[in-house]
Amino acid sequence: MLIIGGGPAGYTAALYGARAGLSVALLERLAPGGQMGTTDQIDNYPGFPQGVNGFELAMGMKEGAERFGARTISAEVTAVELAGDIKTVHAGKESYQAKAVVLATGAQPRELGLPGEAALRGRGVSYCATCDGMFCRGKAVAVVGGGNTAVSDALYLARLCEKVYLIHRRDQLRAPRGDRKRLEDTGKVEFLWDSQVAELLAEDRLTGLKTVNKKTGAQRTLECAGVFIAVGQKPDTALFAGQVDLDEAGYVLAGEDTRTNLPGVYAVGDLRKKPLRQIVTAAADGAVAAQQAEEYLSARP
Ligand code: NAP
């Protein structure tokens, strides 16, 4: 069984697959953990009453799977051939074959689509507060979005930075109600409700933002050293398009049993069309996929 992607879904599939006696390899292009690996504090994965650092949890999941014989291969997958009994996964010059494949490539942060956004990436524009927040230590920063990622980024940045502007397009967070109070309690977060970023201001790096209030039309210019964009995700499934059925947004169409339209191919974690994308649901998918793959493989001649 070959697993593409080393987030919580991929490593749970590896753990369950290896424990079921399958020969398991997992391909990961960066560090283990996926998006979880770059989350500072995770408070909603059961069993950690004080919360847990995402990278530590990722390393624990990797080590746990490897203890039972799963192998991690550091490689970026460039093409896949998923139809047929033997599936081939290409990673540059190397290729790997397996009878079952688990797709666990997750999702990537969505961009705002502003002029200059791509050019300023790494120079004040960031999609990962825990990766880049320290470059803005003691300065003012902005976070865009109103979901769980925006809230956890703003809380993290409030510990490091002088001030955090939270810019959200509506007048209410998408994140749970209690989160607004947690943000207010930091004493550092200023909310810009009903607002969007109209322009990124920069010299050789970001110096500030222009925002506009969608209800009143009022404009503001904010000085800030960084903007952390947290406006949702897009699934990382381009490699599988044309082979595995996807919905209009690019999520893999697979049910709770994680089976795709192709026999022996399973979709787990954030790339699957599902109602709740969390670490705990990603891990659950991984366990189900390994069990499905084990049944599929043992039914073969
Ligand atoms: P999300 O829940 O989809 O939230 C995206 C936010 O960005 C929403 O507030 C949305 O506004 C806003 N938005 C979307 N497009 C925008 C645009 N073009 N311009 C301005 N704002 C825009 O995404 P997420 O916060 O990245 O979370 C993704 C998934 O991971 C969720 O299931 C989340 O629960 C989970 N997650 C969980 C945790 C945790 O529990 N610790 C941490 C991180 C992520 P509207 O509200 O108006 O739609």
Image: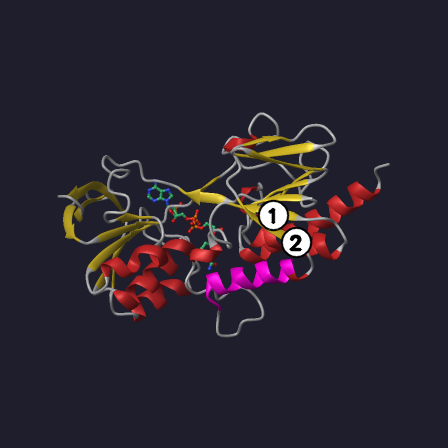
Name, please, the residue furthest toward the bottom.
50
Residue under pointer 2: 70
Please indicate, yes or no, whether residue 112 appears anywhere in the rendered image: yes
- Residue at 50% across / 40% down in the picture? 76
Question: Is residue 205 covered in magenta?
Answer: no
Query: Does 16 appear above or below 169?
Result: below
Q: Position of residue 83 (x, y in %)?
A: 68, 28
Mark 1 neighbour density, 10 Å: few (under 14) some (14–19) many (20 or more): many
Horizontally, residue 131 falls left or right of residue 43, namely left
Q: Secondary structure at mark 2?
A: loop
Name, please, the residue furthest toward the front.
93
Name, please, the residue furthest toward the top.
242
Q: Magenta stretch?
A: 52-66
- Residue at 14% across / 48% down in the picture? 221
Q: Report if the beta carbon of the residue with label 2 is closer than 8 angstroms to ligand 1.
A: no
Q: Amino acid at mark 2?
A: Ala
The dot on residue 26 is 1
Mark 2 neighbour density, 10 Å: few (under 14) some (14–19) many (20 or more): many
Q: Position of residue 269 (x, y in %)?
A: 57, 48
Q: Position of residue 25 (x, y in %)?
A: 64, 47
Q: Amino acid at mark 1?
A: Leu
Tell me the colour scheme of the image: secondary structure
Q: CA distance from mark 1 to mark 2?
A: 7 Å
Q: Quadrant of the C terminus?
A: top right
